[in-house]
Image (cartoon, helix red, strand yellow):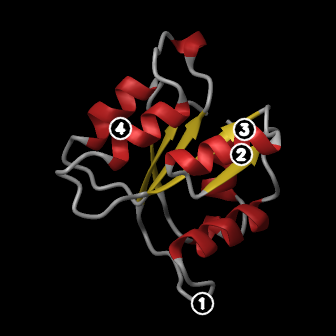
């Protein structure tokens, strides 16, 4: 719920009109990504076992990045309560652009992380779909 509020109601995100899609597991996320929607951002929890998933966030990241049908790869951000240097390095090695420790950082920090992952702090985000797994 907090992540949803950040991305839909908190500045600087509130003015962007992002449409959020949710998945409960890494497997469900992969199904949605193979669907008709083109996601620019995927936020993955590292541990999704409670929702019945078998894939961890890093495994889901690798699977997304291996999808040949994706013409444009999304920005992938991981989330976890565990963000030791080893955990962060593992996430980055898997292909995640950033890792947010829970509880989530303030919205401006998240926005700056996304701008950096996109490659430009000057480029604005418009109305784009994003997928969160799980929130």
Q: Nearer the viewer, mark 3 or mark 1?
A: 3
Which of the two discs, 3 and 4, labels the residue nearer the N terminus? Answer: 4
Within 10 angstroms of label 1, few (less than 14), some, or many (20 or more) residues? few
Which of the two discs, 4 and 1, labels the residue nearer the N terminus? Answer: 4
Location of mark 2 (residue): 88
- Contact (CB < 8 A) between labels 1 and 2? no
At x 79%, y 32%, the residue is 81
- Contact (CB < 8 A) between labels 4 and 2? no
At x 62%, y 23%, the residue is 47
Decide which of 116, 132 is in the foreground and name it: 116
Location of mark 3 (residue): 87
The residues tagged by marks 3 and 4 sit, at their Cα atoms, a distance apart of 18 Å
Farthest residue to the bottom: give it.
122
Q: Report how many numbered discs are placed on residues in the image.
A: 4
The residues tagged by marks 4 and 1 sit, at their Cα atoms, a distance apart of 30 Å
The residues tagged by marks 3 and 1 sit, at their Cα atoms, a distance apart of 30 Å
At x 57%, y 69%, the residue is 117
Q: Nearer the viewer, mark 1 or mark 2?
A: 2
Quarter location, residue 113 = bottom right
Which of the two discs, 4 and 2, labels the residue nearer the N terminus? Answer: 4
Decide which of 69, 15 is in the foreground and name it: 69
The residues tagged by marks 3 and 2 sit, at their Cα atoms, a distance apart of 4 Å
Within 10 angstroms of label 2, few (less than 14), some, or many (20 or more) residues? many
Within 10 angstroms of label 4, few (less than 14), some, or many (20 or more) residues? some
Location of mark 4 (residue): 63
- Contact (CB < 8 A) between labels 3 and 4? no
The picture places residue 127, in percent across and down from the top left corner, at 42, 68
Is there any visible trace of residue 2 in the rendered image?
no
Which label is found at residue 122? 1
Vertical side of 95 occupied by 121: above or below: below
Quarter location, residue 135 = top right
């Amino acid at each position: 719920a907090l992540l949803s509020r950040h991305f839909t109601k908190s500045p600087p995100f509130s003015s962007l009109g992002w449409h959020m899609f949710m998945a409960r597991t890494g497997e469900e996320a992969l199904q949605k990504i193979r669907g008709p929607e083109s996601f620019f951002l995927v936020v993955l929890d590292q541990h999704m076992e409670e929702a019945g998933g078998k894939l961890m966030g890093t495994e889901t990241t690798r699977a997304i990045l291996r999808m040949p049908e994706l013409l444009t790869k999304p920005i992938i951000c991981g989330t976890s309560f565990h963000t030791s240097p080893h955990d962060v390095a593992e996430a980055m090695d898997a292909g995640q652009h950033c890792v947010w420790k829970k509880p989530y950082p303030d919205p401006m920090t998240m926005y700056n992380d996304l701008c950096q992952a996109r490659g430009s702090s000057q480029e604005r985000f418009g109305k784009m779909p994003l997928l969160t797994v799980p929130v």
